[in-house]
Image (tube, helix red, strand yellow):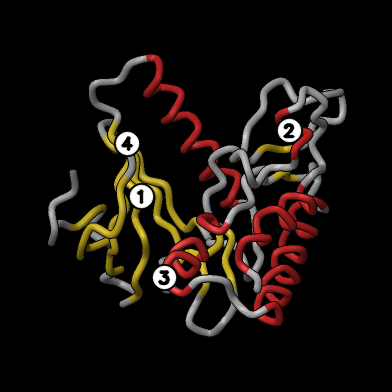
């Protein structure tokens, strides 16, 4: 665990812990050279087993995937540091709240707001789908959409996103979140391009 006040690679000073999961922690850090705040995702490599190896490889794949992208609704990966014991992924710090928290605290939102959010999400999915190869996000839900103070949204958590492979005729595993993923994902008939349906399902609970 990175200590508060410690400096990574002589550059990123850890300010505070802002989130954590089973296999990683996320810190707010200050870039001492650029005087800019970043989010630092820390993934420990100690005590590895087969499950953790999968998590580590998935995190590295996620970082390398995002690093190639450039869209205002996506976070940027600016650095990946592996010191042998810990992997640090340096990314944009996104000020704001996930839509899931906004729903929990304030209830359903006005349809004009939700329509604007949906348009922004469709724009970023169009960007992802028109890469070469296409990138399929697969986990559209309010918890993965950050609302910034300026009213714009950012799509986060590319943990189960993947590049489209033309030769694969069907998904080999059902991923995503039940209740938000397109129903075909959990009915044995899944292909891949169900993201517009995922937007509709992901936003259906936040309108009034």
Residue lying at the far bottom of the rendered structure: 150
Cα–Cα span, label 1 and label 4: 12 Å
Cα–Cα span, label 1 and label 3: 27 Å
In the image, taking residue 179 as reference, residue 84 lies left or right, namely left
The image quarter in which residue 171 lies: top right
Q: Are marks 1 and 4 in contact (CB under 8 Å)?
A: no
Q: Earlier in the sequence, mark 1 or mark 4?
A: 4
Nearest to the eye among marks 1 and 2: give it.
2
Relative to 86, say whether 205 is above or below. below
Give the residue at mark 3.
105
The number of numbered badges drawn on the structure is 4
Give the residue at mark 2.
185
Q: Which of the numbered marks, if any, corresponds to residue 41?
A: 1
Q: Residue at x 40, y 49 (%)?
A: 89
Nearest to the eye among marks 3 and 4: give it.
3
Front residue of 156/196: it is 196
Q: Residue at x 72, y 56 (%)?
A: 199
Relative to 24, say whether 154 is above or below. below
- Which quarter of the figure is the N terminus placed in? top left
Nearest to the eye among marks 3 and 2: give it.
3
The image quarter in which residue 97 lies: bottom left
Give the residue at mark 4.
22
């Amino acid at each position: 665990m990175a200590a508060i006040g410690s400096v990574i690679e002589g550059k990123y000073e850890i300010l505070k812990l802002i989130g954590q999961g089973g296999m990683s922690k996320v810190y707010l850090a200050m870039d001492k050279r650029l005087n800019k705040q970043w989010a630092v995702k820390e993934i420990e490599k100690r005590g590895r087993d087969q499950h953790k190896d999968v998590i580590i490889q998935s995190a590295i794949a996620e970082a390398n995937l995002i690093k190639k992208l450039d869209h205002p609704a996506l976070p940027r990966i600016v650095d990946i540091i592996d010191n042998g014991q810990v992997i640090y992924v340096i990314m944009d710090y996104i000020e704001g709240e996930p839509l899931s928290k906004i729903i929990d605290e304030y209830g359903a939102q006005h349809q004009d707001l939700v329509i604007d959010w949906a348009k922004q999400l469709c724009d970023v999915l169009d960007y992802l789908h028109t890469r070469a190869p296409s990138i399929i996000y697969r986990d559209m839900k309010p918890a993965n959409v950050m609302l910034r103070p300026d009213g714009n949204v950012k799509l986060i958590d590319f943990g189960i996103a993947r590049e489209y492979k033309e030769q694969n005729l069907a998904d080999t595993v059902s991923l995503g979140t039940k209740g938000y993923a397109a129903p075909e994902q959990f009915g044995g008939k899944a292909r891949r391009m169900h993201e517009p349906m995922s937007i509709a399902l992901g936003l259906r609970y936040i309108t009034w």
